[in-house]
Amino acid sequence: MVLNEYRIESGKHGRNCCVVSQFCMPYHSAQAPGAEMRLKIAARVTDSSPAFFTSNRHKILAIMSSAMATADTDTLSAVDAVLQGDEKTTDALIPLLDVLEGMSEQSQSTASARFWMASRDEAWRIPLGESGVLSFFQSLIPTATEPTLTLNALKIIGNSCAEKDANRKRVIDHPLSLTPIITALSDAETRIIAAVVLLNICTDYEPAQLAAVEKDAVTTIFNVLTEDGFDDPLDYFLRVLELLISHDSGKAAAPEGALETLLTALEYGQEEFDNTLSLVSILSSLLTTQRFHRIVVKGDGLFSCVLDAIEKTYDLTVDVERESKDNSLIAYARNQLIEAVCEIATDSEFLEVYPLGGEVMGRIEKWLEVQPGKEELAVTACMVFGNVGRSDAVCIELVEKGLQKPLLKIVEETADRFDESVKQAREKKEAVEGGGEVAEKLPTGAMSVGVIHAAVGVLKNLAIPASNKRVLVETGAFRAVRRMLEMEGVGVGQVWYSAVSLGRLATVNTEPNAKELLASTPETQSTLSLFLKRYAEVEELPVKVEISRTIAAVLRIIYATDSEPKKELLNGLLAHPSPALEDALWDMVTQDKYPVVRSEGWFALALFAREKEGAERVRTGFAKEMQLVKDTAQGESRDRENVAVLCAGLKALGEDEGVEEILRRVVVGAVDG
């Protein structure tokens, strides 16, 4: 950032110095013949005749003033000779320190303009620091009475520190450090220049940022922004704050009213693109801290203002020439705020301040209506409801209020849009290639996948309380599950996982839902059939595990009592093809990533083998996994007992090979245990 006379220019400054050449050494002001003679005459008159001096006081002072003016003029000429010379070195500047110190403040002010102009030239910046000139002008700021001197001194510091870490270090190591600059932020005459100077010192230089925080720059800037009548451009103040707030100490230094200041500027200000982004960035940085979370939760209307800020990011006008970059910046800033909002919703007192039936939560629920180009609002709403819905009581209340309806609508409509985009891509590909094979890679539809994943995340929470399960399926949960499993394209693996997870949770311990899961018609296959179809196609273990666990959940319902198994359900399960059904159960015990799932698998196999039809279905897998069964027979007691039940079922079929040996191992294992 170069400080010029009429404007502030920003830009990159090179680090290469110019080639030096010869220069003329300056002479001290006392060496000027005319000046020296006038000073001697005035001194002699004063000493020899006090009365004469008194009666001719004004004339004598005029002579002395003339002598001093002539001296300063001569010294300024010496300054010009050096600064306008070709040799831009430290040695060239060192003699000028004595010259500067001998000047009156008015002349120092005049000379400061010369040094400021010189500091615009990168070649002078390091010499200004090494010679001590930079420190000299830094020392003048607190005591200067000439406004021009103060401004020029600030400009010299600002220019000298532009991308020059050595000078930045000199400034913060100076006894005054950054205090004069930060103090200048509070003066209406100097604050804009001081903000630019501080930005130059702090950009890409962490020691200066931390020093500025230590010297109360954060508090000072927020105080300036809230002053009555403050109407200066925000640019440089905000850019400095962005740097300082990036540190934990900077966030800690921000006053409690900082959020209100930023939100007010966003709500009522007519800021340009860059300033709005800066405001959002600072706001989201502060909202990463627990202190400001609490302030938002407790603050009157602050959370609504944060929601306003998110919506405002969609109204920003971007520069056509840098549309892609600007849109990326907007998305990043928006996502930062969204993360903050979702984190705030986890606060234990959030629902006390913003109850489910209240205005704020009602506004968030409206965001569930997906708007093209504003899909992030729907994702945000889902995440907020997911974070508040972490207890059975809240989830039951949400279902009573019908939250599942807009969530299921999101899933189905977003899946439709995703499939339409895939269809268009295929048609375009076929048109280009003359009807050739469709490329394997289809559009990822990352946003569509993200929206669906967020909505199903909430639905899974809602499906945990027992009283909610039937309501969800009656509202269309299985229809939505089927719709997700019908999606095809790159990136849908996560959607399939969400689908089968929701299906399993809705089935657990709920007989009517299990019946619906198994039910088929002449026109449509059952939902479980669709599960098994995807099971054969996917490689991702989590998807396979969820499908296997769904089958296990059905078996638990079938054998939920000591009475006869529920034949209707058992027949519905057995109607699904072999070996897909039983293979999914055997895969539970052969995988070694999830021990709990392995135990659940042994239990499911034991249940299945209790009936003749089930035992027949697991026989092939038993022979194939004989060694695993033998090893498990001597393993943990829970799994060992389930293996015994499995073997008993097979023995009832007349299966002899290996069964007796395994049962003996079970007995031995029980005794040893």
Image (cartoon, rainbow, N blue to C red):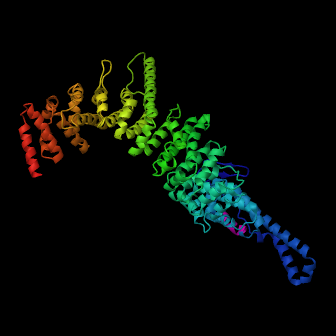
427 or 598, nearer to the observer? 598
**Where on the picture, by quarter, is residue 325?**
top right
Percent x, y for residue 628?
Answer: 15, 40
**In the displayed structure, would residue 105 be above or below residue 161?**
below
Percent x, y for residue 285?
Answer: 53, 51
For the stretch drawn in magenta, the main secondary structure is helix
**In the displayed structure, would residue 352 be above or below residue 581?**
below
User: How many numbered marks appear?
Assistant: 0
Q: Is residue 601 visible?
A: yes
**In the displayed structure, would residue 123 be above or below residue 58?**
above
Which residue is situated farthest in the top direction here? 434
Q: Would you say 113 lies left or right of 286 here?
A: right
Q: Would you say 627 lies left or right of 496 here?
A: left
537 or 379, nearer to the observer? 379
Residue at 58%, 35% in the rendered image = 323
Q: Is residue 495 visible?
A: no
421 or 16, nearer to the observer? 421
Residue at 43%, 25% in the rendered image = 419
Span highlighted in magenta in the image: 93-100
Percent x, y for residue 112?
Answer: 72, 61
443 or 67, nearer to the observer? 443
Residue 94, magenta (yes or no)? yes
Percent x, y for residue 372?
Answer: 52, 31
**In the displayed structure, would residue 563 be above or below residue 160?**
above
